[in-house]
Amino acid sequence: MPSAPPQSPAPQAAPAAGSWLETVLRPLLPVTKDLLAASLFINILALAGPIFVMQVYDRVVYQAGLSTLTGLVIGMAVVVLFDFTLRQMRARVMQGVAVQVDVTVGRRLFHKVLSLPLRSLESRPTAAWQQIFQDIEVLRNCLSGPTVVLLFDLPFTLLFLGLIFVIAMPVAWVLVGALVAYVVIAALSARAVGSAADKERKRQISRDVMMAETVMGRTTVKALAMERGLLPLWEDRQADAIERSLERGHRSDRFVNMALAVTTLTTVLMTTVGALSIVDQKMSIGALVAANMLSGRMIGPFNQLVGAWRTLLGFRQSARRLGDLFGQPEDRQSSGLALPRPSGLLTAEAVTFRYGRETVPTINAVSHVFRPGGITAIMGRNGCGKTTLLKILLGLYAPESGRVLLDGADLSQFTRAELAGWIGYVPQDCVLFSGSIRDNLTRAHPGIGDDDILEASTLAGAHQYIINLPDGYATDVGEMGSLLSGGIRQRLAIARALMGKPSVLILDEPSGSLDRQAEDHLREVLIKLAQDRTVIIVTHSPALLSACRSIVVMEQGQVAVSGPAGDVMGYLSRKGTPAAPPTPGPQTVSPTAPSAGA
Ligand SMILES: Nc1ncnc2c1ncn2[C@@H]1O[C@H](COP(=O)(O)OP(=O)(O)OP(=O)(O)O)[C@@H](O)[C@H]1O
């Protein structure tokens, strides 16, 4: 593999964030025309009711025109039928919009979440990630719900107002005043409720984080009877969330009730002004009744404006949150040139990494060459940075400075899919996913053949166990593999890592849950695998250490000692504890070259 020029290890910038909403809304444009047409006809048909009443009062009643009444009733029946059909059509179109938003935004969001660098995923609690998916619901409900219908209906209220001006001018001015009042209330409501909703959301996330942790740690919670400690904490957070919810509710109620008061006041004023106008013979009773009916069609939407404005504000907040997420840099998605499978020579060059703003980096200028053809063990005290170093070697974390090279090529130029194919990983916590054993083994390699599955699970010592199960490879592993024992989960995790025949195999405490027999088997397998690939393990197991060709001892994020396994072990036993070498700074135990695996 050719040596690549040094590249920025920073993840790739995402496509322009602002345009994401546009790409969601643009396909909905044709639908908009349909909705506009349906709303136009529905609102025109809405005029039929008041006209019918006005005609009945002013003509049929006074002139006993029964034939006119028959004609009017037939006409109204046709109108009702059309109105029903149009509303059905509109509802179906809205359902289509809901599905489209769900599918397009849902897929895009899930893909985005999967494309984010690990550090970005770790930056938010699980509950916050679940909440972000609720933002899709907000978008969907807004774009396919009553708010959009209302927005389409609002322009037609001017049509009704115009008509009222024609048939009952005095009451029309009352309505103009009412409309202004509704708009002001809606705007004030959105502002007041918006900030309260934001606070409520934060409190809910804090409560949900605790709920998620409690459920995930249920065994520990039960075993240690932690409910005495958890209950007050839960109640505090729940009370906090409820308090915020009540605050939002109070604010919201105030404005909803104000809008209702305006509605009642409008009816009183309209009737009063209308009655005085009739007395003054400026308009007929029929005109007042028709104006009343038309005003109902106007006031309804404006009354809803208070709720709709808030929905639109929620839409804006959700769209902004999603936009921020869509704008985040992603892991590299393409790597210019497909390179052949590497031989497995993995080199860390002065790699430095820190999680936050720690003064001392978690990984501090680590340099080491991991060569194929033998097992390298990484040892060191708890918290000295072993797992962090592994994640850097895997390309999961980008170093702050320095770089990691695979066959001389900087890891930062490769996609996650490429790296995952070349570097297999068995994490410390062997997480499985709901589904069958086979699903778990093949999820990263959907097209893989049965022979490869068999080979990997046999190597990992899992095959014999699996075929003894009644459902064999179809056995359901349960949520996060909870139906299997820790040791079997570990064997499956090893099989999963071997599935793509990686050139580098990285295992973090791979025998922590294995029995002695399984550990011996793993030892033999690793020796065999290491013949033509690079195998790196974090372990303190004497059985596995005895199979290692070389050992790297870490101390506070640095390589303290490295060299052939026998020499390092001898050196450490002479000097005391294996994880605490006496002299800080890298040392190489003879006969290894400085900082290079044997
Ligand atoms: N996601 C994280 N965010 C912030 N700090 C972290 C994170 N993961 C680990 N650390 C910190 O980095 C340091 C090194 O952790 P790491 O897990 O790499 O150590 P380790 O040597 O593998 O420990 P152990 O032997 O206990 O598994 C620790 O101080 C730990 O608290």
Image (tube, helix red, strand yellow):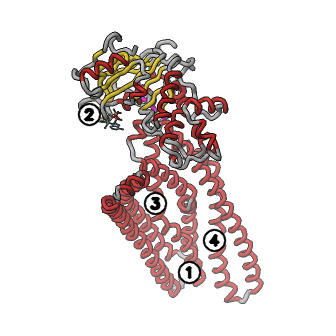
The answer to whether 267 appears left or right of 81 in the picture is: left
Instruction: Identify the mark nearer the N-term, 2 or 1.
Output: 1
Kind of residue at disc 1 = Leu
- Indicate which quadrant contains ligand 1: top left
Residue 32 can be seen, yes or no: no
Q: Is residue 2 magenta?
A: no
Residue at 46% x, 43% y is 323
Which residue, given by chain and number where applicable, does mark 1 sit on? 288
Disc 3 element: helix
Magenta residues span: 7-15
Residue at 70% x, 88% y is 63
Q: Quadrant of residue 543?
A: top left
Q: Of circles 2 and 3, which is in front?
A: 2
Which residue, given by chain and number where applicable, does mark 4 sit on? 47
Residue 309 is marked as: 3
Q: Are marks 3 and 4 in contact (CB under 8 Å)?
A: no
Return the x and y of residue 275 as percentages of the image width and height: 50, 85
Instruction: Identify the mark nearer the N-term, 3 or 4.
Output: 4
* Circle 2 residues within 10 Å: few <14, some 14–19, many ≥20: few
